Image (cartoon, rainbow, N blue to C red):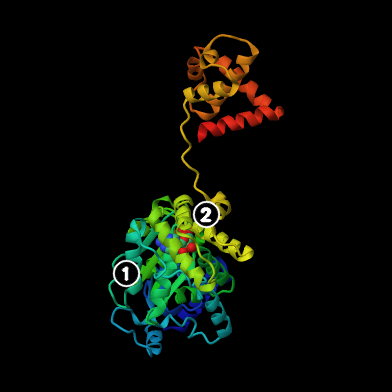
Amino acid sequence: MEINDQERWARVKGRLKAEVGDDVFSSWFARMDLEGVNNDTVRLSVPTRFLKSWVQSHYGDRVLNCWQAEEGKIQRIELTVRSAVLRTNATKPAANGQAAPFETRMAKPGADEPRQPGHQSAMTNDALGGSPLDARLTFENFVVGRSNTLAHAAAKQVAVARRGDSVMFNPLYIHAGVGLGKTHLLHAVTWAGNAGGERKVLYLTAEKFMYGFVSALKTHTALAFKEALRGIDVLVIDDLQFLQGKNIQAEFCHTLNALIDAGRQVVIAADRPPTDLENLDDRVRSRLAGGLVVEMGPLGEELRLEILKGRIAAAKSHHESFTVPDEVVEFIAKSVTHNGRDLEGALNRLLAHSKLTGQPVTLEMAEREVRDLIRPQEPKRVKIEDIQRIVARQYNVSRSDLLSSRRTANVVRPRQVAMYLAKTLTLRSLPEIGRRFGGRDHTTVLHAVRKIEGLVGTDSALADEIELLKRQLQE
Ligand code: ADP
Ligand code: MG
């Protein structure tokens, strides 16, 4: 290679650095070498395939332009992965033919960068330590029911796969509402997948992914972060709906593609299907939708019962005296919402109560403790006839009095109350209510509703009366 070429390359690098900034430059170009120049083609090399595809897709044109600025005849940039690096790092051969050797090496990012070792490892530990795992969220403690059979089976499949097994679905994308077991399943995959020590399963929340990347960029080590990511067999990302920011998404997209192309498993959970992730661009969405997308439904009553029993047994192992009568378990399973978190919350309250007071858990106590977690019942449909009947009874008038045109005070007020209740407890329109009250005009109904609304604010006896009537009607 001519000396001139190296000098030119140094100037090209200078241009690149000026254009993209120090951070980006040191992340992506610091380890790019010039291999040679042939006529109109410049051959450059980078140490990893990942780096190659990243630079190609994001900075290909830019590199070419910078070269052309130095030497007009250059038409093409050819980027290769340096084989020398491969050889020096091939000390630990891949366990099978499946994984390319350079990828195995990536489990130790920065190993070939002795210049700043402390820096590298600190970043790597932080970025790739993964998010903390909850020891209780295992497959053993995961109850399988109709709503989660498929998600569970797929997760299990991922967890028991061995290095080199062909990947059946990629990514595995699980979506469900809050508290329906996504995180539980993802932790379970991570625990089980790492158990054998053969594979590395990394669990990251989307926030951790973003944080890791941003902080890595700040410390000029995005490269190491990327490569370390590539050293894992299964990447598990929780709460993908929180992934934000254009750069982060580009980064995520690239990581996803690189991992999937390299035959690595990706598992993702989010609170909505890929098509509803408005923040992500179309390519990412379609990539996400291209694997196996599984929804987990609400926890059915049976499932809730089983989850509760498991939780109680676990609590009992720490607090021997904690016993929950069957009727209480059934009550909670029946009445507490579909959400697993509320089930846990309900149980924690019983536990706290029984520990603090030393009192046994009873149905009455449970009803009191978990009142606010109880799923609102479908509001009962109230009929206008019922309103008229109950109001008439309350004020000791007849129903026909309410419908009549009599305007004596003892009928007018109950009639207004009844119309007010009809408006607030049913979906009937004002004209419809008017018709049902002896063919009155809708303005009469409106007047009655306003009148009572006004009085309720000042007349507490009337307010109580109306409360009582409402309760009778809704029971
Ligand atoms: P998500 O991540 O979907 O919001 P989590 O995984 O955090 O929900 O679950 C909320 C709570 O419900 C956790 O305590 C979890 O252990 C429990 N849970 C949900 N589904 C199940 C299940 N199928 N078996 C056992 N526990 C479950
Ligand atoms: Mg979660």
Q: Mark 1: few, some, or many residues within 10 Å (few <14, many ≥20)?
A: some
Which marked residue is nearer to the observer: mark 2 or mark 1?
2
Q: Looking at the image, is 326 positioned above or below residue 49?
A: above
Label 2 Cα crowd, 10 Å radius (few <14 / some 14-19 / many 20+): some
Q: Which residue is mark 1?
A: 157
Respond yes or no on whether mark 2 lies under 8 Å from ligand 1: no
Question: Which is nearer the N-term, disc 2 or disc 1?
Answer: 1
Q: Tell me the quarter of the image containing the N terminus.
A: bottom left
334 lies left or right of 402:
left
Horizontally, residue 42 falls left or right of residue 459, namely left
Q: Amino acid at mark 2?
A: Leu
> Against 399, is 114 above or below?
below
Q: Position of residue 53 (x, y in %)?
A: 40, 70
**Residue occupying image coordinates x 54% and y 60%:** 361
Instruction: Look at 67% across and 25% down and name the residue there.
Output: 454
Residue pointed to by mark 2: 363
Q: Is residue 333 above or below residue 191?
A: above
Q: In the picture shown, does residue 388 fall above or below 239?
A: above
> Ligand 1 is in which quadrant of the figure?
bottom left
The answer to whether residue 253 is seen in the rendering is: no
Position in image of residue 11 (x %, y %): 53, 75
Q: Which residue sits at x=57%, y=59%?
A: 349
